[in-house]
């Protein structure tokens, strides 16, 4: 927080500001690159974390490590998921109340502490297990908080013309983390003593986190958040520092259009009760859209990602030590989609691209399901099919996070992200259990065929809902997409 923090304007006071217009007139500069590098690693860390926990879990039941039972190992992922939900809700509320910068520094620290402590777990006694699960819960809480605080910060400080591609690309880097985690654990578990290597695996994330810690500390607070909370002087200082950085790169700033100024009446922070009223009374169709997009992509991803090794082993007789190769191929397809398709969400538009990626991935999954049931696929072609399907599905899933982070008013943005993230995680948790039951011992491909068709239908439903309820946010200021709750304006306020 700034040493020269200004006193917030009195509640009810009116502020006129051009800060949103000043942010949106900027073109790409080194500042934006630093911001993406500093904040975008949240998804890299989550992908890394999930992958490492999955890979390490296979060795934690050995006596030379912790000697855990299969149930105890499986509980690690469950506790981490619960931590993510808790962290998203807690830190999402605090991010809206205390600021984006305060929270994206704190959430990284919570994650670093949780992971570093996990590596110190000493055995399988009751006390040791409590310690292990507590540290995984803390690490999950840090990552859950990252989703809420950082999606908000990126969208609020990114010019409108770049917001779609950046947000989608950053969310897609989850799969870059998955690749790093796969390679890291593969090397560690095969070349170092298991009792040391699994601990080192959990330290890969903190090492990356420490590398970006300093970058985050030097990022400014969101000027939009500051002005909405009546801290006008600090907001002016923050946007001025960003503009100086942009000008140092050789750019000349375009003249400001005074008609784009916003007027807001400062008000107290909004809690979850206020959030629920806005979501379900004022913005029911946007809430339905957000829930549908988040739930459908989470269900499909958890269903496929957490059971792909079972499919390879049970139906294609792939040895366990070879599955990392298939995961890397799967992750590359997921990483490429958002990076290569992201710019189209800004140029072609949100509604067309989100609908297209959801429906196309669902149709492709249905086709691959038919080929699987007909015995036309092997381990290589099955993985290739997944790569193609999730090239589109990954861009669609990333756009779900983009949608939630831009179609709700700034005052409740982080909390809205947290709520729909939590809902998606809870529904997504059904996928692995359901598909694990369908896979069984690999004796009946027909059951999994039906499961794949269900997954395809779920994604197609998400695409159809987007077509009818989607918001055309491409190239628009956040304040035009969702007028702030505190705005004093004659512009139409978002409804439905």
Image: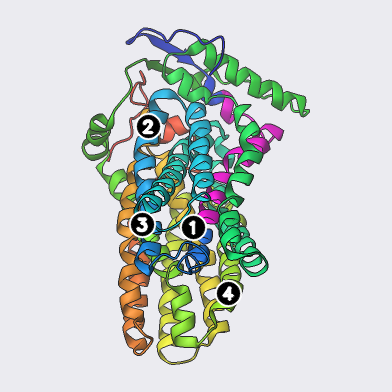
Q: Which residue is mark 2?
A: 409
Asked whether the beta carbons under mark 2 and mark 1 sit within 8 Å of each other, the answer is no
The image quarter in which residue 432 lies:
bottom left
Of the two numbered discs 2 and 3 in the rendering, the one whose residue sits closer to the viewer? 3
The image quarter in which residue 228 lies:
top left
Does label 4 or label 1 sit earlier along the sequence? Answer: 1
Does label 2 or label 4 sit earlier along the sequence? Answer: 4
Q: Position of residue 271 (x, y in %)?
A: 28, 28
Q: Position of residue 167 (x, y in %)?
A: 53, 45
Does label 3 or label 1 sit earlier along the sequence? Answer: 1
Q: Which element carries disc 1, helix, strand or loop? A: helix
Q: Which element carries disc 4, helix, strand or loop? A: helix
Q: Which residue is mark 1?
A: 50
For image coordinates 35% across by 18% down, the residue present is 488
| 344 and 109: which is toward the camera | 109
Q: Is residue 109 magenta?
A: no
Q: Which mark is residue 78?
A: 3
Q: Which element carries disc 3, helix, strand or loop? A: helix
């Amino acid at each position: 927080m700034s040493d020269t923090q200004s006193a917030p304007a009195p509640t009810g006071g009116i502020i006129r500001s051009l800060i949103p217009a000043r942010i949106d007139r900027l073109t790409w500069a080194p500042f934006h690159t630093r911001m993406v590098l500093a904040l975008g690693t949240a998804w890299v860390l989550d992908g890394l974390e999930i992958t490492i926990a999955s890979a390490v879990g296979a060795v934690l039941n050995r006596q030379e490590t912790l000697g855990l039972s299969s149930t105890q190992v499986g509980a690690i992922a469950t506790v981490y998921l619960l931590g993510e939900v808790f962290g998203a809700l807690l830190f999402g509320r605090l991010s809206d109340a205390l600021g984006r910068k305060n929270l994206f520094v704190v959430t990284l620290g919570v994650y670093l502490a949780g992971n570093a402590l996990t590596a110190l777990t000493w055995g399988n006694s009751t006390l040791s297990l409590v310690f292990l699960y507590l540290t995984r819960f803390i690490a999950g809480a840090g990552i859950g908080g990252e989703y809420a605080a950082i999606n908000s910060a990126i969208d609020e400080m990114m010019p409108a013309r770049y917001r779609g591609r950046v947000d989608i690309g950053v969310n897609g880097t989850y799969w870059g983390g998955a690749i790093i985690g796969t390679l890291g654990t593969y090397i560690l578990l095969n070349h170092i003593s298991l009792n040391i290597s699994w601990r080192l695996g959990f330290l890969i994330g903190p090492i990356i986190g420490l590398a970006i810690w300093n970058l985050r500390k030097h990022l400014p607070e969101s000027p939009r958040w500051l002005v909405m909370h009546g801290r006008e002087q600090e907001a002016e200082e923050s946007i001025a520092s960003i503009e100086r950085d942009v000008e140092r790169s050789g750019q000349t700033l375009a003249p400001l259009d005074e008609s784009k100024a916003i007027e807001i009446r400062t008000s107290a922070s909004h809690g979850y009760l206020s959030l629920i009223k806005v979501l379900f009374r004022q913005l029911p169709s946007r809430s339905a859209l957000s829930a549908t997009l988040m739930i459908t992509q989470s269900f499909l991803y958890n269903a496929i990602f957490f059971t792909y090794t079972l499919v390879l082993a049970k139906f294609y007789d792939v040895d366990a030590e070879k599955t990392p190769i298939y995961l890397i191929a799967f992750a590359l397809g997921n990483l490429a989609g958002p990076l290569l398709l992201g710019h189209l969400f800004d140029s072609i538009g949100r509604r067309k691209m989100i609908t297209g990626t959801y429906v196309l991935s669902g149709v492709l999954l249905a086709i691959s399901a038919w080929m699987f049931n007909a015995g036309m696929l092997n381990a290589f072609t099955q993985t290739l099919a997944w790569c193609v399907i999730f090239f589109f599905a990954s861009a669609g899933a990333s756009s779900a996070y983009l949608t939630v982070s831009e179609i709700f008013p700034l005052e409740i943005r982080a909390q809205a992200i947290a709520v729909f993230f939590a809902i998606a995680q809870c529904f997504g948790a059904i996928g692995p259990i359901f598909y694990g039951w369908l896979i069984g011992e690999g004796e009946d491909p027909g059951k999994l065929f039906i499961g794949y068709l269900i997954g395809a239908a779920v994604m197609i439903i998400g695409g159809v809902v987007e077509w009818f309820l989607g918001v055309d946010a491409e190239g628009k200021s956040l304040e035009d997409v969702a007028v702030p709750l505190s705005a004093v304006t004659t512009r139409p306020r978002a409804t439905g």
